[in-house]
Structures are given as structure tokens and as C-alpha cells.
Image (cartoon, rainbow, N blue to C red):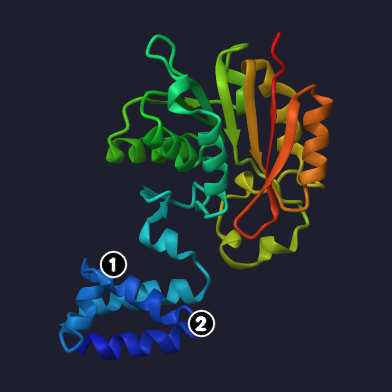
Amino acid sequence: MSELRSLLRAAREMLATDSAALEAEVLLGEVLQRPRSWLYAHDRDTVTPGRQQRFFDLLRRRAEGEPLAYLLGQREFWSLTLQVSPDTLIPRPDTERLVELALQHMPPEHMPPERPLQVVDLGTGSGAIALALAHERPQAHVLAVDRSLAALQIAQVNAQHLGLQRVGFVQSDWSEALGDASCDLIVSNPPYLRLEDPHLQQGDLRYEPSVALLAGADGLDAIRHIVSTAPACLHPGGWLLLEHGFEQGAAVRQLLHDRGLSEVTTELDIEHRERVSLGRVPEK
């Protein structure tokens, strides 16, 4: 049996990346079901051959490029721990900007008990956006929509683990299952990568579901569909918010303008790049 410190040293050499030390500790902590702080105080403890083998199996998969989130089966988003799998995208910090903007357009004072805000997350995946909004605005009714039943099942498990009761789940191709003028706010982080985008051959994207990444020759197919159909599902004065690629802001703003939405604008992400565009259905 090997000591923890020798296992971690071998793991750092095996991964050989800038984050090798952190990832090795996280994976060993997962195998031992211990926090990273415990590893520091027990670095001379030994690990059984079975656990050692599992640790090196995980290291091998990580060294081959498999996302850490998939190896752990979870990812933190908006301070919430979410279950993820290869059926879902891995939630990213940039998408928290979409949550922030959505919250700005659903303040608590606009949610009287007699008619709580109706909020929809199109293409919910793991449920990250929908559950973050439900966590922050527990009086709102949030509907998580996805065409993938496997993804919806993961989102439902996440809602149950977080104790979020007022979240519904619907299998649908975007807004197809929604009624006219049935909601106040629609948010979406849809696919927006071009079919030939070179990033598809890099990093975590190689392992994530292509259906949640690819959107035609220019990366705008899904956004075009949402912009053409979703506004009909919004009450007058309702908002549509879309995450997109940092080079797509002008094109998405034009789509929103052409659909007749007002107050169209694009907001920046944490790296000061255009990331979320939004528009409002005009009041009658």
C-alpha cells in the first residue's frame, strides 16, 4: 500500500498540467470520500490497493481529457452543487451572468401571491439556470424545458436534492410545449457553436453532448428558432434573455430587433465580452 503523499506526487507527474496538484487532490478526496483539507493532515496514511487502483483509473481518464466534472459527477454553479453527466453540458461561470440578468428582471416586489412570475428555462440541461433562479426567487414558478429526457431526469434529481418545490419539468423542442402569452420571462443558454468551430476539438467540449453545442454553419440556428417562436409565449412586457458566443452579439441583437422586441441590448460577461442579449415584448 502507498502513502497519500506518494500517490499525489505520482498523480501530479501523470497529469502534468498547471492544475495537476488541485485535480489530483480532488480526485483522491473523491475516492477516499474525504475533503482536501483531510489529505494534508493525513499525508502519511496508506491507501488500500482497491482505492489506489480506482484513483489511477480516474487519473488516466483525466489525463486523456475527460472533464473533471464528469469524473466527479457534479459541478458547482451559483453556489449550488449540481449533478452532471455526459447527457448534460457542464455549467460554466459565464452562464452565471445570464442568471444575474434574469434576476434583475424578476424582482421580488413584482411577484404578488395572486400571480407569481412564470419563468421558463429553454434547454435546461442539468437545470443549472432554472434551479438558480428558483433558489433566489422561491415565489416564482419556474419551468425547465429540454428535448432530452436524460437531461431532464438529471435536472429533476438536482431539484429534489436542493429541496426546490416550485420547479416544473417539460420535455419539449424549445418553446413548442408552451402556450401563447403564458410566461413573463424566458431564458436560454442554447447551442451556439459553428459546425466547424475549432474549439470542438479542445478541452471538455470533446466530451460534452454535441446536440447542446452545435447550431448550424454560423452557430445561430437554435437562437433563430427561439427568437422566432418564444416571444409569442411571453406576456406583453415580458423579457427574452439569450446567452451566445462573444462574437455573436450584433447578429443576435438584429434578430431580436427584426422580431419586434424593444429595449434590445447586449450585456458583457466576466471577461468583458458580449455574452447575453435580451429584448422585451412591447406593451399593448
Q: 177 and 57: which one is in front? A: 177
Is residue 57 something one can see in this rendering? yes
Residue ID at (69%, 47%):
214
Q: Which residue is mark 1?
A: 30
Quarter that holds the C terminus: top right
Q: In the image shown, does 29 or 206 lie closer to the viewer?
A: 29
**Quadrant position of residue 172:** top right
Does residue 164 appear to the left or right of 263 in the view shown? left
Instruction: Indicate the secondary structure of the residue bearing disc 2.
Output: loop
Residue 282 percent across, percent down from the top left = 72, 17
Q: What quarter of the picture does the N terminus occupy?
A: bottom left
Image-based side of 194 in relation to 146, left or right: right
Separation of residues labelled 1 and 2 (CA atoms): 19 Å
Which residue is rendered at x = 53% and y = 70% of the image?
65
167 lies above or below 197: above
Give coordinates of residue 139: x percent, y percent: 37, 23
Residue 17 image label? 2
Residue type at mark 2?
Thr
Q: Residue at x 47, y 34 (%)?
A: 149
From this viewpoint, is residue 150 visible?
no
- Residue at 50% x, 51% y is 91
Q: Residues within 10 Å of mark 2 (few under 14, many from 20)?
A: few
Does residue 6 sit above or below 58 in this rendering? below
**Where does residue 264 sit, x and y in percent of width and height?**
74, 32
How many neighbours does mark 1 have within 10 angstroms: few (below 14), some (14-19), or many (20 or more)? some
Residue farthest toward the front in the current orientation of the protein: 109
